[in-house]
Image (spheres, helix red, strand yellow):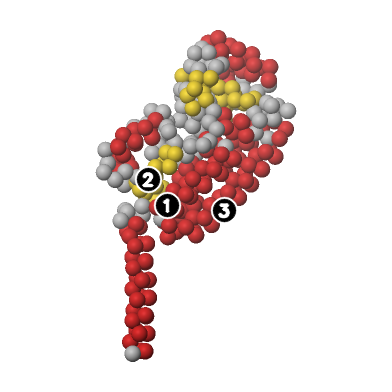
Amino acid sequence: MILNHNFIRFFKKMFLRLFISFFCIIPILSYSEPPVVLVSVPPYRYFVKKIAEDTVLAASLIPPGANPHVYEPTPKQVQLQKQAVLWLKLGEKADQKAQRVFQEMKNPPLMIDLTESLALLSYKTKGDCCSDSGVKDLHIWLSPKMMQTQAEKITQGLIQLFPIHTELYQGNLNIVLKELEQIDQELTTTLKNKQGKAILVSHPAFAYFCRDYKLEQLSLEEEGKDCLPQYISELLDKVKRLGIDGIIIEPQHGSKAAKLLAQKLKIPTYIIDPYSEDYIENLKQMAEVVKNIIHD
């Protein structure tokens, strides 16, 4: 009888372990291999890959080099979107299109709004480029401080879907947070003597970067449209007065006006891609360019 009781206890224990293991594995096996995590723009792929490693496939709605304001996904890319189990939503135009696709799906992906609870800035009006339009600026990844909160949200979404990898995700999140703290400190040191100064850009993507490091952003356009000639004339005078020695141009946006202005002012242009997936190195490059184009 003792042998029988021991055998029964052993059998129950093994059955319980198999039962728990089976239901822990089911969520992973039910997804595509590997599961697709969808982000809005390439910089977020950097963080998904750093945190989740090869447990998921990080896919971006906007491919590298594309203009997020006008990009149209191919049928193949739409099919990839439909495979997503987690959607890290930013609110770009491409997100709005993706949302319409997901609304038609029987099993849409889990959606995490990366902008939730963040203090968002607004673009200025199209007309005079001087007042608040209420249209939110979504280039929030360009603030390492704000990116820490977003990295935590990404991790929470991953753990919710794949709890079996909780230890891996939490450990990698801690590494990412330290990395963001370090780059923030490095940029603060690099730009310390530039506080209160201004940079001139072709497209207003750097507002959060400027807010973090106490800079002013002067833009040749607002919300994708050129400012009025009167504002450009005022801008010319301001650039001369402030001694700004360069214009930052984005590869995704037209730079004809910026190049003409650079020729008129006899100052160089610098190409910076705020949508680069190489997040840390891109921030370092931005800081070096800003340091070079602002006179002490």
Q: Nearer the viewer, residue 231 or 6?
A: 6
Circles 3, 2 touching at the beta carbon (< 8 Å): no
Q: Which residue is located at x 44 percent, y 48 percent?
A: 157
Q: Secondary structure at mark 3?
A: helix
Tag in front: 3 or 1: 1
The answer to whether residue 48 is visible is no
Q: In the shown orientation, is residue 260 left or right of residue 14?
A: right
Q: In the shown orientation, is residue 119 left or right of residue 8?
A: right
Q: Which residue is located at x 68 percent, y 17 percent?
A: 241
Q: Which mark is residue 110?
A: 2
Residue 268, by quadrant, is top right
Q: Residues within 10 Å of mark 1 (few under 14, many from 20)?
A: few
Please state which amino acid type lies under the numbered disc 3.
Asn
In which quadrant will I find the N terminus? bottom left
Q: Which residue is mark 3?
A: 174
Give the Cα distance between marks 3 and 2.
23 Å
